[in-house]
Amino acid sequence: MKQVTDGIAMLDLSTDMGGYQVEIHPTLIWDDKDAVLVDAGLSGMVPTIRYEMEAAGVPLERLTWIVLTNQDVDHMAGAEELLAAVGHRVLVIAHVKDTPYIEGEKPLMKHNASRGPVPKVRVDIMVNHADVLPVAGGLTVIYTPGHTPGHMSIYHRNTKTLIVADASECRNGKLTGPNKECTPDMAEALRSLTNLATYDVKRAVCYHGGLCDRNVNEQIRKLAGQAYGVANSRCGCNFTDPRTGHSTAARPLSLLIGRWGHTVPTLPSRPQQRRRVDCEANHLGSDVDV
């Protein structure tokens, strides 16, 4: 566990996947009322998550929210076990476009079925770009598709902390962009980097690579600038907010949008080049079928 700032900790989890040691970093955010876990790890990780949370001074039983940034198995497969371990209702949050995969209505895009079934989990609240979860001072949803159709990053404005998820990896404190071997729509993922560049970020947590806390704004803007040229050369697309055509301010959810008769606004879908990608055995992408 690494304390990122007051009320935010990065969990350190590792597992063997196909002979490779894979490290992942869910993020814990808490205040006096709630505790939010951003991403749930893999099945069998509850004891380690409990240990890491207790090291941060937050018992597992305090957990009230689980935010799943995307449908990949290393982000969502542990959610059902966590819900059972906590012993009380915990709200599960996901982007509207990845919810059908997380709930098992559609097969996970990158999961190799020969490795067995993945536990599905019910999503209580489906969110979209610029929604603000009214917890821990407000968590802003940033839609960053490409790695998956409903991939999202999370921004904590009070501390200027960005939970990048898989929109970029980090190596030795440097943001390196999305993992191209595990990203079915790389052009979309590169466009998504410009969404991150509109926020004032002091520190960033990547699910693969951990904490980046030096010149983060400069790193994101440089990465976005490089992505601009690459993505435009591939698809000729402009960098605009996918819903409004310009940068949008966050909008609070006065009433949580879920399954109680409220309509979730959906973003217009973009044409995507779909690839079957198997990144579970090696997240660095040694086994990819295109």
Image: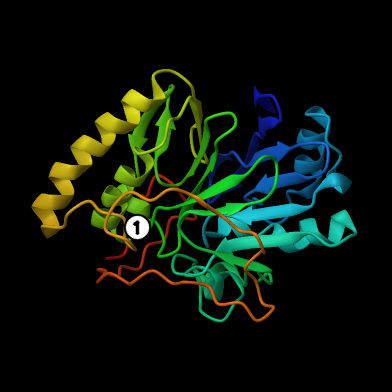
Residue 245 occupies quadrant: bottom left
Instruction: From the viewer's side, name the closer residue of 79 and 5.
Output: 5
Residue 217 occupies quadrant: top left
Q: Which residue is mark 1?
A: 146
Q: Is residue 46 left or right of residue 6?
A: right
- Would you call the spot at circle 1 few (<14 residues within 10 Å), some (14-19), or many (20 or more)? many
Where the N terminus falls, by quadrant? top right
Q: Amino acid at mark 1?
A: Gly
What residue is at 83 percent from the left and 43 percent from the top?
Answer: 33
What is the x, y in percent for residue 214? 43, 18
Q: Is residue 214 left or right of residue 114?
A: left
What residue is at 35 percent from the left and 46 percent from the top?
Answer: 195
What is the x, y in percent for residue 108? 50, 70
Where the C terminus falls, by quadrant? bottom left
* Depicted 128 relative to depicted 34: above or below: below
Query: What colour scheme has been applied to the protein in the rendered image?
Result: rainbow
What is the x, y in percent for residue 150? 45, 63
What is the x, y in percent for residue 202? 48, 24
Counting every numbered tag in the picture gives: 1
* Depicted 8 relative to depicted 253: above or below: above
Instruction: From the viewer's side, name the closer residue of 75 and 220.
Output: 220
What residue is at 83 percent from the left and 29 percent from the top?
Answer: 57
